[in-house]
Protein backbone atom coordinates (compact mmCIF):
# COMPACT_ATOMS: atom_id res chain seq x y z
CA UNK A 1 0.00 0.00 0.00
CA UNK A 2 2.83 2.37 0.87
CA UNK A 3 4.43 1.88 -2.58
CA UNK A 4 1.09 2.57 -4.29
CA UNK A 5 0.71 5.79 -2.30
CA UNK A 6 4.21 6.92 -3.26
CA UNK A 7 3.52 6.19 -6.95
CA UNK A 8 0.24 8.12 -6.84
CA UNK A 9 1.99 11.02 -5.12
CA UNK A 10 4.75 11.12 -7.72
CA UNK A 11 2.18 11.02 -10.54
CA UNK A 12 0.18 13.83 -8.93
CA UNK A 13 3.27 16.01 -8.51
CA UNK A 14 4.34 15.29 -12.09
CA UNK A 15 0.91 16.17 -13.50
CA UNK A 16 0.82 19.34 -11.41
CA UNK A 17 4.26 20.31 -12.70
CA UNK A 18 3.26 19.71 -16.32
CA UNK A 19 0.08 21.76 -15.82
CA UNK A 20 2.06 24.65 -14.35
CA UNK A 21 4.54 24.43 -17.23
CA UNK A 22 1.80 24.65 -19.88
CA UNK A 23 0.00 27.47 -18.08
CA UNK A 24 3.24 29.44 -17.91
CA UNK A 25 3.89 28.71 -21.59
CA UNK A 26 0.39 29.90 -22.51
CA UNK A 27 0.95 33.13 -20.57
CA UNK A 28 4.13 33.77 -22.56
CA UNK A 29 2.49 33.32 -25.96
CA UNK A 30 2.33 36.67 -27.74
CA UNK A 31 -1.09 37.73 -28.93
CA UNK A 32 -1.91 40.80 -31.00
CA UNK A 33 -5.24 42.47 -31.74
CA UNK A 34 -6.34 45.37 -33.92
CA UNK A 35 -9.47 47.48 -34.21
CA UNK A 36 -10.12 47.81 -37.98
CA UNK A 37 -10.65 51.48 -38.81
CA UNK A 38 -11.46 53.75 -41.71
CA UNK A 39 -8.11 55.57 -41.67
CA UNK A 40 -7.53 58.75 -43.70
CA UNK A 41 -4.65 61.23 -43.78
CA UNK A 42 -3.78 64.41 -45.67
CA UNK A 43 -0.49 64.24 -47.54
CA UNK A 44 2.23 66.80 -46.77
CA UNK A 45 5.94 66.59 -47.59
CA UNK A 46 6.83 66.02 -43.92
CA UNK A 47 3.47 64.45 -43.02
CA UNK A 48 2.94 61.47 -40.73
CA UNK A 49 0.40 58.68 -40.39
CA UNK A 50 -0.28 56.40 -37.45
CA UNK A 51 -1.72 52.95 -36.78
CA UNK A 52 -2.72 51.31 -33.51
CA UNK A 53 -2.74 47.70 -32.32
CA UNK A 54 -2.74 45.86 -29.01
CA UNK A 55 -0.56 43.15 -27.45
CA UNK A 56 -0.93 40.98 -24.37
CA UNK A 57 2.76 41.30 -23.40
CA UNK A 58 4.42 44.35 -21.88
CA UNK A 59 7.20 44.11 -24.42
CA UNK A 60 7.68 42.49 -27.82
CA UNK A 61 10.24 42.26 -30.60
CA UNK A 62 7.74 44.01 -32.92
CA UNK A 63 8.35 47.23 -30.98
CA UNK A 64 12.11 47.32 -31.68
CA UNK A 65 12.51 49.34 -34.87
CA UNK A 66 15.98 48.11 -35.75
CA UNK A 67 14.84 44.47 -35.65
CA UNK A 68 11.79 44.80 -37.90
CA UNK A 69 10.62 45.66 -41.36
CA UNK A 70 7.29 47.50 -41.40
CA UNK A 71 5.06 47.72 -44.46
CA UNK A 72 1.49 48.10 -45.65
CA UNK A 73 -0.04 45.57 -48.04
CA UNK A 74 -3.06 46.55 -50.13
CA UNK A 75 -4.32 44.71 -53.20
CA UNK A 76 -1.19 43.95 -55.29
CA UNK A 77 0.83 46.78 -53.69
CA UNK A 78 3.39 46.72 -50.86
CA UNK A 79 4.49 50.00 -49.26
CA UNK A 80 7.53 50.08 -46.97
CA UNK A 81 7.13 52.36 -43.97
CA UNK A 82 9.96 54.78 -43.22
CA UNK A 83 11.06 56.68 -40.09
CA UNK A 84 8.95 54.44 -37.88
CA UNK A 85 8.40 55.40 -34.23
CA UNK A 86 6.79 53.16 -31.63
CA UNK A 87 4.96 54.23 -28.47
CA UNK A 88 3.57 51.77 -25.93
CA UNK A 89 0.65 52.83 -23.72
CA UNK A 90 -0.06 50.59 -20.73
CA UNK A 91 -3.73 49.64 -20.46
CA UNK A 92 -5.78 47.44 -18.17
CA UNK A 93 -6.28 44.33 -20.33
CA UNK A 94 -3.84 44.91 -23.18
CA UNK A 95 -1.03 47.27 -24.07
CA UNK A 96 -1.70 49.76 -26.86
CA UNK A 97 1.02 50.13 -29.49
CA UNK A 98 0.99 53.34 -31.58
CA UNK A 99 3.09 53.06 -34.73
CA UNK A 100 3.91 56.32 -36.53
CA UNK A 101 5.66 56.62 -39.89
CA UNK A 102 6.18 58.99 -42.80
CA UNK A 103 3.06 59.34 -44.89
CA UNK A 104 2.98 57.54 -48.24
CA UNK A 105 3.90 59.70 -51.23
CA UNK A 106 0.89 59.35 -53.52
CA UNK A 107 1.06 59.92 -57.29
CA UNK A 108 -2.56 61.09 -57.64
CA UNK A 109 -4.93 63.52 -55.97
CA UNK A 110 -6.29 60.78 -53.74
CA UNK A 111 -5.51 57.15 -52.95
CA UNK A 112 -7.93 54.66 -51.43
CA UNK A 113 -7.66 51.01 -50.43
CA UNK A 114 -10.64 49.21 -48.89
CA UNK A 115 -8.57 46.52 -47.15
CA UNK A 116 -5.04 47.04 -45.80
CA UNK A 117 -2.69 44.76 -43.86
CA UNK A 118 0.03 46.13 -41.58
CA UNK A 119 2.89 43.65 -41.82
CA UNK A 120 5.73 43.53 -39.30
CA UNK A 121 8.55 41.14 -40.09
CA UNK A 122 11.47 40.13 -37.85
CA UNK A 123 13.81 37.16 -37.33
CA UNK A 124 11.22 35.24 -35.30
CA UNK A 125 7.98 35.67 -37.25
CA UNK A 126 5.82 37.83 -39.48
CA UNK A 127 2.85 39.61 -37.89
CA UNK A 128 -0.13 40.52 -40.09
CA UNK A 129 -2.73 42.99 -38.76
CA UNK A 130 -5.92 43.83 -40.74
CA UNK A 131 -6.04 47.56 -39.99
CA UNK A 132 -9.08 48.37 -42.19
CA UNK A 133 -9.30 50.88 -45.04
CA UNK A 134 -6.88 53.69 -45.91
CA UNK A 135 -7.40 56.99 -47.76
CA UNK A 136 -4.71 59.61 -48.44
CA UNK A 137 -5.50 63.03 -49.92
CA UNK A 138 -3.14 65.40 -51.72
CA UNK A 139 -4.98 68.70 -51.08
CA UNK A 140 -3.77 70.47 -54.23
CA UNK A 141 -6.92 71.69 -55.94
CA UNK A 142 -8.77 71.88 -52.60
CA UNK A 143 -9.40 74.94 -50.41
CA UNK A 144 -9.16 74.65 -46.64
CA UNK A 145 -12.70 75.17 -45.34
CA UNK A 146 -13.26 78.05 -42.91
CA UNK A 147 -15.43 76.87 -40.00
CA UNK A 148 -16.45 78.14 -36.55
CA UNK A 149 -17.31 74.76 -34.98
CA UNK A 150 -16.90 71.09 -35.86
CA UNK A 151 -17.21 67.79 -33.94
CA UNK A 152 -18.65 64.29 -34.33
CA UNK A 153 -21.58 62.42 -32.82
CA UNK A 154 -21.43 58.69 -32.03
CA UNK A 155 -24.26 56.20 -31.59
CA UNK A 156 -24.52 52.46 -31.01
CA UNK A 157 -24.65 50.44 -34.24
CA UNK A 158 -24.33 46.65 -34.02
CA UNK A 159 -23.51 46.84 -30.30
CA UNK A 160 -20.61 49.31 -30.57
CA UNK A 161 -20.27 53.08 -30.69
CA UNK A 162 -19.76 54.37 -34.24
CA UNK A 163 -19.51 57.81 -35.83
CA UNK A 164 -22.97 58.61 -37.21
CA UNK A 165 -22.67 62.29 -38.09
CA UNK A 166 -20.87 65.61 -37.87
CA UNK A 167 -21.95 68.89 -36.31
CA UNK A 168 -20.62 71.85 -38.27
CA UNK A 169 -20.94 75.64 -38.29
CA UNK A 170 -19.60 77.32 -41.42
CA UNK A 171 -17.85 80.66 -41.00
CA UNK A 172 -19.18 82.04 -44.29
CA UNK A 173 -22.63 81.71 -45.76
CA UNK A 174 -22.85 79.01 -48.43
CA UNK A 175 -25.65 78.12 -50.86
CA UNK A 176 -25.52 74.34 -51.19
CA UNK A 177 -23.52 71.21 -50.36
CA UNK A 178 -23.12 68.80 -53.26
CA UNK A 179 -21.17 66.19 -51.29
CA UNK A 180 -19.40 65.60 -47.99
CA UNK A 181 -17.30 62.55 -47.08
CA UNK A 182 -14.66 61.29 -44.65
CA UNK A 183 -11.85 59.79 -46.71
CA UNK A 184 -13.55 57.54 -49.21
CA UNK A 185 -15.23 55.32 -46.63
CA UNK A 186 -18.09 57.47 -45.27
CA UNK A 187 -20.49 59.74 -47.14
CA UNK A 188 -22.88 62.37 -45.81
CA UNK A 189 -26.60 61.61 -45.93
CA UNK A 190 -27.66 65.04 -47.16
CA UNK A 191 -31.36 64.08 -47.36
CA UNK A 192 -31.48 63.64 -43.58
CA UNK A 193 -29.31 66.63 -42.63
CA UNK A 194 -30.90 69.02 -40.15
CA UNK A 195 -30.37 72.80 -39.92
CA UNK A 196 -29.59 74.47 -36.57
CA UNK A 197 -28.89 71.15 -34.84
CA UNK A 198 -25.88 70.69 -32.55
CA UNK A 199 -26.13 67.22 -31.03
CA UNK A 200 -24.24 65.61 -28.14
CA UNK A 201 -21.09 63.55 -28.63
CA UNK A 202 -23.07 60.39 -27.83
CA UNK A 203 -26.64 60.08 -29.13
CA UNK A 204 -29.32 57.53 -30.02
CA UNK A 205 -29.49 58.08 -33.77
CA UNK A 206 -32.49 55.77 -34.28
CA UNK A 207 -34.61 57.97 -31.97
CA UNK A 208 -33.39 61.28 -33.36
CA UNK A 209 -33.52 60.31 -37.07
CA UNK A 210 -35.80 57.26 -37.53
CA UNK A 211 -35.25 57.25 -41.33
CA UNK A 212 -31.45 57.15 -41.04
CA UNK A 213 -29.85 54.08 -42.64
CA UNK A 214 -26.09 53.84 -41.95
CA UNK A 215 -25.51 51.58 -44.96
CA UNK A 216 -27.45 53.43 -47.67
CA UNK A 217 -25.09 55.82 -49.47
CA UNK A 218 -26.79 58.41 -51.68
CA UNK A 219 -24.37 60.19 -53.99
CA UNK A 220 -26.69 62.13 -56.30
CA UNK A 221 -28.22 64.44 -53.72
CA UNK A 222 -27.52 67.99 -52.59
CA UNK A 223 -28.41 70.12 -49.61
CA UNK A 224 -29.65 73.69 -49.99
CA UNK A 225 -28.29 75.58 -47.01
CA UNK A 226 -30.78 77.52 -44.88
CA UNK A 227 -28.33 78.09 -42.03
CA UNK A 228 -24.61 78.05 -41.20
CA UNK A 229 -25.11 75.27 -38.63
CA UNK A 230 -25.99 71.68 -39.52
CA UNK A 231 -25.99 68.12 -38.28
CA UNK A 232 -25.11 65.85 -41.19
CA UNK A 233 -25.51 62.07 -40.70
CA UNK A 234 -23.03 59.72 -42.38
CA UNK A 235 -23.35 56.36 -44.16
CA UNK A 236 -20.74 53.63 -44.51
CA UNK A 237 -19.30 51.63 -47.37
CA UNK A 238 -18.30 49.19 -44.63
CA UNK A 239 -18.85 49.62 -40.91
CA UNK A 240 -15.31 50.47 -39.76
CA UNK A 241 -14.51 52.51 -36.68
CA UNK A 242 -13.59 56.17 -37.27
CA UNK A 243 -11.04 57.61 -34.85
CA UNK A 244 -9.61 60.36 -37.06
CA UNK A 245 -9.70 61.42 -40.69
CA UNK A 246 -9.92 64.23 -43.22
CA UNK A 247 -13.25 65.56 -44.48
CA UNK A 248 -13.88 66.56 -48.10
CA UNK A 249 -16.69 68.82 -49.26
CA UNK A 250 -18.08 69.95 -52.56
CA UNK A 251 -19.79 73.25 -51.73
CA UNK A 252 -21.27 75.50 -54.43
CA UNK A 253 -19.44 73.25 -56.93
CA UNK A 254 -16.03 74.01 -55.34
CA UNK A 255 -13.79 71.46 -53.55
CA UNK A 256 -12.95 72.07 -49.87
CA UNK A 257 -11.35 69.98 -47.14
CA UNK A 258 -10.75 69.83 -43.40
CA UNK A 259 -7.35 68.52 -42.35
CA UNK A 260 -7.02 65.21 -40.51
CA UNK A 261 -9.32 65.62 -37.50
CA UNK A 262 -9.32 63.49 -34.35
CA UNK A 263 -12.94 62.80 -33.46
CA UNK A 264 -11.95 61.13 -30.16
CA UNK A 265 -9.25 62.81 -28.06
CA UNK A 266 -8.29 59.89 -25.79
CA UNK A 267 -6.48 56.69 -26.80
CA UNK A 268 -8.81 53.80 -27.59
CA UNK A 269 -9.02 51.23 -24.80
CA UNK A 270 -9.02 47.56 -25.75
CA UNK A 271 -11.76 46.70 -23.25
CA UNK A 272 -14.12 49.33 -24.73
CA UNK A 273 -13.91 47.91 -28.27
CA UNK A 274 -13.22 44.23 -27.55
CA UNK A 275 -16.30 43.16 -29.51
CA UNK A 276 -14.82 44.58 -32.75
CA UNK A 277 -11.20 43.49 -32.33
CA UNK A 278 -9.52 41.23 -34.89
CA UNK A 279 -6.70 38.91 -33.87
CA UNK A 280 -3.39 39.41 -35.66
CA UNK A 281 -1.92 36.49 -37.59
CA UNK A 282 1.54 35.36 -36.52
CA UNK A 283 3.44 33.33 -39.14
CA UNK A 284 6.63 31.69 -37.91
CA UNK A 285 9.51 31.33 -40.36
Image (cartoon, rainbow, N blue to C red):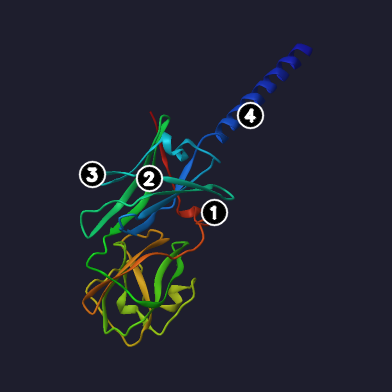
How far across and down, in percent of the image, does residue 212 sit? 36, 74
Instruction: Locate the C terminus and report the quarter of the image it occupies.
Output: top left
In 3D space, how far apart are the residues under numbered discs 4 and 3 (Cα atoms)? 45 Å
Sooner in the amino-acid sequence: mark 3 or mark 1 = 3
Dot 4 or dot 1: first in sequence order is 4
**Dot 3, crowdedness within 10 Å: few (<14), some or many (≥20)?**
few
- Give the farthest residue toward the right: 2
Closer mark to the observer between disc 1 and disc 2: 2
Front of the two marks 4 and 1: 1
Which of the 4 quarters of the picture holds residue 257? Answer: bottom left
Mark 2 sits on what residue?
83
Q: Which residue is mark 4?
A: 20
Q: Residue under label 1, please give it.
A: 271
Tell me the element at label 1: helix
Q: Are marks 4 and 1 in contact (CB under 8 Å)?
A: no
Of labels 3 and 2, earlier in sequence is 3
Q: Residues within 10 Å of mark 1 (few under 14, many from 20)?
A: few
Residue 73 vertical placement versus 162 (above, below): above
Residue 201: image location, x then y, percent: 49, 72
Query: Quarter holding the N terminus?
Result: top right
Comes first in the chain, label 2 or label 4: 4
The label shown at residue 76 is: 3
At x 37%, y 47%, the residue is 130
Q: Is residue 221 above or below residue 236?
A: below
Residue 213 is at least partly visible in this image: no
Considering the numbered disc 3 on the image, is that residue within a helix, a strand or a loop?
Answer: loop
Other residues around mark 4 within 10 Å, as few (<14) / some (14–19) / many (≥20): few
Residue located 24% across and 53% down the image: 106
Q: Is residue 44 above or below residue 207?
A: above
Amino acid sequence: MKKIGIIIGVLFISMFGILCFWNEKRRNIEEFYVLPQAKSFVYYEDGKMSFEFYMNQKDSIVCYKEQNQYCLKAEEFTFSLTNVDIEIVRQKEMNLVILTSDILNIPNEEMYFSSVILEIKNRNYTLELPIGSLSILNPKGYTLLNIDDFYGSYSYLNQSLELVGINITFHDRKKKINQVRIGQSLYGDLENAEANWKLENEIDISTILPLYNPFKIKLNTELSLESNTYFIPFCYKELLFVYEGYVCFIIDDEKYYLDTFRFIVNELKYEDYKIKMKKGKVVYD
